[in-house]
Amino acid sequence: MVYPSSGLRTVAGLALVGALFFLPAVCMAQGSELEALRAAVKDMQQDLQKALSRIEQLEKEKTADSARLGQVETSIKTVQSAPSILNPAIGLVIDATAEHRDKAGGDFNFRAAELGISASIDPYARAYAFITGKKDEVELEEAAIVTTSLPWNLQARGGRFFADFGRLPKFHVHELPFVNMPLSLERIVGGESKADGTELSYLFPTAFFLRGTIGGYNKIGEENDRLDDGKSRAWSRFTYLSRLHTYLDLTDNHSLELGTSFAYTPSIRISDDRGGSRSLNGVDVTYRYQPLASTLYQGFTLGGELFGNSERVERDSGFRRMFALGGYAYAEAKLTRQWAAGFLYDNAPSLASPGKKTIGYSPFVTWYLSEFNRLRFQYSYLDDKVREEREERGHQFFLQWTTVLGAHAHGFRTR
């Protein structure tokens, strides 16, 4: 057996002693590094928490800023509408005629003094009213609220107003291009399309103007006496409307306006205690030639409407459903800034006997003394086969004087 030398034993002993001496130091060094890593991770967690807290704070500040921005925008809109809120537009129209009718004689006819008021309510709605004084009464002709900020191109209207049926039925009498409302419109529609109710209009997103309207009303027509505005009733006895209306620029100087209307009353009580529905249809067409070089003081307008009415009416043989078809057409030429002339043709059937008609022929001349003062002369000849009213036949002469005080407008009438 061979034993290591004493030198080798000495070296091995020294190595063992060195290992025993340095091992605790190495272990201590590794422990210090681990503690350092733990401290670094803890610091990173604290920094991350601070960053998350700061992000949350910034998001809250952003939300608050957006709310403040919305309040500022609302305040700006309110301020923009404030002038009309505090100072509504007010105007007065006075309309009178001197008349002579072969079968009825002469008359100085004070037709109306119409007071108009309109203003924005807030950024979301506006309102208007027209109060009319006539010979023997004062009436609230229109009073309506109109929305201005509905989404999806919608607009709502409610109150008392002229329903969106046809074209001229929505005109006040002093706005017409001639002296009187066409007799066909008076008989079939009931005069101005005055109604208590509500409407909703939608402006289609097309390259040209296209608007649809639906509505529900107590009734349509100022002279419509089939239903009573002052009484509650079943919903089947209300009148419901739909209308589609478009406007097209054919060229820079020529334009065309088209509309179709339908009003339906499901049930109307009549004297034999049997109900019946009523359908009222209308188609309107208006062509305009408006030279750009002459602004609004020269041009030509050709317009007309065709109405159809279907309902049960009383006849000598009893109650029967009758369909009456009638309408009017007119042409007007604006000659200069002050002068215009035109002609009206009117075909007005009897609702009870549609074969009997009153045919009217009416040339007229208008002198605009200014934008607010107008004289109009009209001659009418009515060939009457209906024989219901003496005033609706023979030769007739009218001199109309209309003046406007202040701001008074009913909308965009003469595009």
Image (spheres, rainbow, N blue to C red):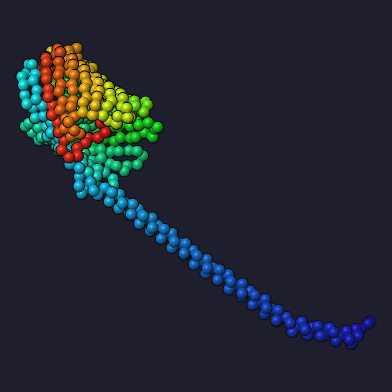
Q: Position of residue 149 (x, y in %)?
A: 31, 43
Q: Give the vertical position of 73 relative to 3 (above or below).
A: above
From where the camera sits, is residue 348 visible? Answer: no
Residue 301: percent from the left, percent from the top? 27, 24
In this rendering, the answer to whether 312 lies above or below 55 is above
* Residue 209, above or below 350: below
Q: Nearer the viewer, residue 56 or 364?
A: 364
In the rendered image, residue 219, in percent from the top left (x then y), is placed at: 19, 30
Q: Quadrant of residue 100?
A: top left
Q: Nearer the viewer, residue 36 or 130?
A: 130
Residue 376 versus residue 227: which sits nearer the camera? 376
Find residue 77 and report its horizontal and vertical position in percent.
30, 49
In the picture, which quadrant includes the N terminus?
bottom right
Q: Quadrant of residue 307?
A: top left
User: Considering depth in this image, is 376 or 216 the residue closer to the camera?
Assistant: 376
Image point (27%, 30%), residue name:
296
